[in-house]
Image (tube, helix red, strand yellow):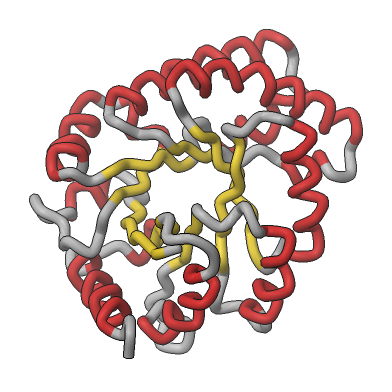
Amino acid sequence: MRPVFGLGIPGEEALSLLPDELPAAMAFGEIPGEMLDSASHRAALRRIFPKQGRALIVRDIMPADLAGIVPAAPLRLKVEFDSGFRTRCAAAAKMGCRVVSAGFDIVRALTDASYEAGLVKMLHSIAGILEEFGTIMAFPLRLPAEAESVSAFLAFKHRLFYPGFRYLLEFHYEEPGAFEILENALGVLNFERSLWRLPYRPDEESRLTEDVLEKLRPVWRRGDDRPVFVCVDPGRGSFEREFPERFAAVIDRFSAREGE
């Protein structure tokens, strides 16, 4: 597996700060689902990403707070959710997006049988929409916070019995023992290593650098030569006009180490 890096676009303000042409090291962008609702945002995104041969991924295609409550909500809200989900999937597909994510509350589902039944039913209902648009749904799996439940997370996905559901590994490298915990979790994540999200931290002690990426190289190198998609997520508070170029330099230095 080889890492392909992308840039997280946290919102409208960050979009306005992007250069007309992104550095070559940034191969795709991850946008919030709300941007799909704006024609002007879609036009700007097309100019910066698809028209320049870069892919798009959609984060939180539906609001996280809504995705968390809808499995246990009245039927009316579920119908509205399905309708909104389909509308955004259609908009994403028109922009070439093939991967979306949503913050369904799988943690709650692991301990609440009634909620789990509602969540499974809802996910089965949206599987048809995913199939219609050729879209993959990624469930964020935070590491190391959920490391002890990785097997349970995998078992939950297996019960869905649909290949269009995947996990996106949100790896918080800055937390104590993160790399050791990741190594212990990799055995059960053998087929869930193609989608990653890494937080960008501007603080000196926890900044995402080429040294941090180098520690992940053995994880990404395992198996075949298929790409691993790694989104660098600066968050709303850390995004500056200089960020794309600054982080592209980190990726270039990391890439230059290959074969050393």
Asked if residue 120 is positioned above or below residue 204 in the image, the reply reads above
Q: Is the C terminus in the top left, top right, bottom left or bottom right quadrant?
A: bottom left
Question: Residue, x 43% and y 77% (percent of image)?
Answer: 213
Q: Quadrant of residue 69?
A: top right
Q: Position of residue 11 (x, y in %)?
A: 33, 46
> Residue 45: where, in percent of width, then height?
21, 38
In the rendered image of this protein, does residue 42 appear above or below residue 25?
above
Q: Is residue 245 left or right of residue 187?
A: left
Left or right of 102 in this view: 13: left
* Image position, residue 194 (x, y; %): 50, 54
Q: Position of residue 66 (x, y in %)?
A: 61, 30
Q: Is residue 218 above or below residue 80?
A: below
Residue 228 as seen in the image, left or right of residue 222: left
Residue 121 in sight in this render:
yes
Question: What residue is shown at x 41% (from left), y 69% (from top)?
Answer: 200
Note whether residue 233 is visible.
no
Quadrant location of the N terminus in the rendered image: bottom left
> Which quadrant would residue 116 be assigned to in this image?
top right
Q: Residue, x 29% and y 50% (percent of image)? A: 28
Left or right: 115 with respect to 226? Answer: right
Of residue 1 and residue 26, the one placed in the foreground of this image is 1
Camera-side residue of 75 and 173: 173
State the residue at coordinates (25%, 59%).
Answer: 26
